[in-house]
Image (cartoon, rainbow, N blue to C red):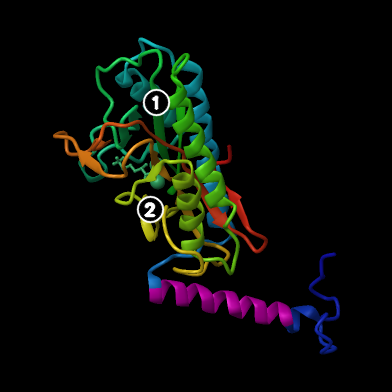
Amino acid sequence: MKIGRNDTCPCGSGLKYKKCCMLKQGKREANLKDLYYNKHRIRLKDEKDIQGIRNAGVLVMDTLKMVREHLRPGLTTEAINTLVHDFTVRHQAVPAPLNYNGFPKSVCISINEEICHGIPGPREIQEGDIVNIDVTSILDGYYADANQTFLAGSVSDKARKIVAVALESLRRGLAQIKPGNRLGDIGWAIQDYAEDQGCSVVREMVGHGIGFDFHEPPQVPHFGKKGHGLELVPGMVFTVEPMINLGGRELKILDDKWTAVTRDRSLSAQFEQTVVVTREGFESLTPF
Ligand code: MF3
Ligand code: CO
Ligand code: CO
């Protein structure tokens, strides 16, 4: 049941709701907004901001769907880059990776032992590859970020396993998101599951606040301790994007200065969503 502005306040004060607890709730929210900014530089989002990020998220997910429909052995990663770039621009949006800290392309494509930040080029997708496509779009000034790992044709059991573990890791992390829980609860749930499956969690790259900018505070580690870290509050918007390796967790950056690969060259998979903390739990702004 929803309380109307002019109803009697349920707290028993005898005042109208709008003159009592509704007002206090508004003040609490304003205080929290200032506190999270001053203490952590986290910019909590309001309804209008969330709608903007949700719109960007719809475009990101439409882009991933479009790529999935084109993906086949023989396609070059450069061709995928062109598909993403043109689709984004055609929808009045901007591909956030292009020129971001010098990144030369409009999408990150990471294959097999590549963990993340792969640069599109002449490489052809091969039957049996696992291919991560990481799309970030800016629409009306708002950013949304999501990625998925696709299977090219029929793949090995190992490939199937690491992709399944990465997806379930994301799901378990997301399931922890609600006000009162902490960032460490998300990381703990991911690490506990992935390591239990005999896999490892990359430490060097983490999820991040997003919305007004590509990477905002806070950092969202995919490992951690239950009950530790910053408390989640409504209006926080961030990504969860665990990178899970079949072998060791250590990484190496290639000579191109971007591509991260597993040091032992074992397979790595990743899934990412952008979410907002709500009063009840969370809403994915890039749902799948
Ligand atoms: N999309 C990546 C992330 O999830 C960041 C890519 S940065 C780029 O945070 F420059 F490589 F595009
Ligand atoms: Co991200
Ligand atoms: Co991303």
- Which residue sits at x=42%, y=60%? 224
Q: Position of residue 242 (x, y in %)?
A: 43, 45
Q: Quadrant of ligand 3?
A: top left
Badge 1 is on which residue? 131
Q: CA distance from mark 1 to mark 2?
A: 26 Å
Q: Position of residue 6 (x, y in %)?
A: 83, 76
Quadrant occupied by the N terminus: bottom right
Mark toward the start of the polypeptide (1 vs 2): 1
Question: In this orientation, does residue 140 appear?
Answer: no
Q: Does the magenta-highlighted stretch encompass residue 29?
A: yes
Badge 2 is on which residue? 213
- Which residue sits at x=28%, y=26%? 120
Foreground pick, 113 / 47: 113
| Residue found farthest to the bottom | 13
Q: Does the magenta-highlighted stretch encompass residue 4?
A: no
Q: Please, what is the three-letter code of the amino acid marked with disc 2?
A: Asp
Q: Which mark is residue 52?
A: none
- Which residue sits at x=37%, y=21%? 80
Element carrying mark 2: loop
Q: Position of residue 21 (x, y in %)?
A: 73, 81
Asked if residue 252 lies left or right of residue 6, the reply is left
Q: Please, what is the three-letter code of the amino acid marked with disc 1?
A: Val
Foreground tag (1 vs 2):
1
The local crowd at label 1, few if under 14, some if 14 to 19, many if 20 or more residues have their Cα within 10 Å, is many
| Residue found farthest to the top | 74
Label 1 near ligand 3 (CB < 8 Å)? no
Please state the extent of the stretch shown in magenta in the rendering.
Answer: 21-39
